[in-house]
Image: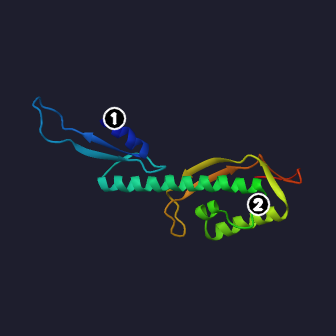
């Protein structure tokens, strides 16, 4: 049972390891005192308090959510380019982007639609990792992202027109 709990906590990025006092031959009635090891996303495991453990788990959950949101946006971005652009935000874009970023993306999609282009090929996420040292405009989680769209080719009426970057 403890192995299952430890395995589940390891997957969450933090571990709670029960530590027992050395036995002196006589059974002890005292319960084991838990100690905590925190592994913040992108960080080094270190001993920590219960409060730090709880905070690290919450931060790791936010990072996981941010990564999932980015992946969802990335897939939608590629889908829109392959569909020939868009004149208005899709449901997924509205769920994953906002503000200036959404405005700039929509301008790109409108340009693709106006030029009658369609993307073909693939784009990949090469790097997607947390940046614990970056905070901007009140952000809670920041990601380091590198994508490869060199295999994504835009075509106009079936003829190659431009390649992705």
In what element is the residue under mark 1? helix
User: Where's residue 130, x and y in %?
Assistant: 53, 53
Residue located at (49% from left, 63% from top): 140
Residue located at (79% from left, 48% from top): 120
User: Where's residue 71, x and y in %?
Assistant: 60, 52
Of 58 and 77, the residue lying toward us: 77
**Colour style of the rendered protein structure:** rainbow
**Which callout, 1 or 2, points to the residue nearer the camera?**
2
Q: Are marks 1 and 2 in contact (CB under 8 Å)?
A: no
- The CA distance from mark 1 to mark 2 is 50 Å
Check the picture and name the quadrant holding the N terminus: top left
Side of 44 relative to 110 (left or right): left
| 160 lies above or below 141 | above
Of 67 and 148, the residue lying toward us: 67
**Residue bearing the label numbered 2:** 85
Residue located at (37% from left, 47% from top): 46
- Residue 96 is drawn in which quadrant? bottom right
**Residue bearing the label numbered 1:** 3
- Residue 17 is drawn in which quadrant? top left
User: Where's residue 92, x and y in %?
Assistant: 62, 60
User: Where's residue 129, x and y in %?
Assistant: 55, 50
Of 142 and 5, the residue lying toward us: 5
Q: Which mark is residue 116?
A: none
| 10 lies above or below 134 | above
The residue most toward the top is: 25
Side of 107 relative to 65 (left or right): right
Mark 2, residues whose alpha carbon is within 10 Å: few (<14), some, or many (≥20)?
many
């Amino acid at each position: 049972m403890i192995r299952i709990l430890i395995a589940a906590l390891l997957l969450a990025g933090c571990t709670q390891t029960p530590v027992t006092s050395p036995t002196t031959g006589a059974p002890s009635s005292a319960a084991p005192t838990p100690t905590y090891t925190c592994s913040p996303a992108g960080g080094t495991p270190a001993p920590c308090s219960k409060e730090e453990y709880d905070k690290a788990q919450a931060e790791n959950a936010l990072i996981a959510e941010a990564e999932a949101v980015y992946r969802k946006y990335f897939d939608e971005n590629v889908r829109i380019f392959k569909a020939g652009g868009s004149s208005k935000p899709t449901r997924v874009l509205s769920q994953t982007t906002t503000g200036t970023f959404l405005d700039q993306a929509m301008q790109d999609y409108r340009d693709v639609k106006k030029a009658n282009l369609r993307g073909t090929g693939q784009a990949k996420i090469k790097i997607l990792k947390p940046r614990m040292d970056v905070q901007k405009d009140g952000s809670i989680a920041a990601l380091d992202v590198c994508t490869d769209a060199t295999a994504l080719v835009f075509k106009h009426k079936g003829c190659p027109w431009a390649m992705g970057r």
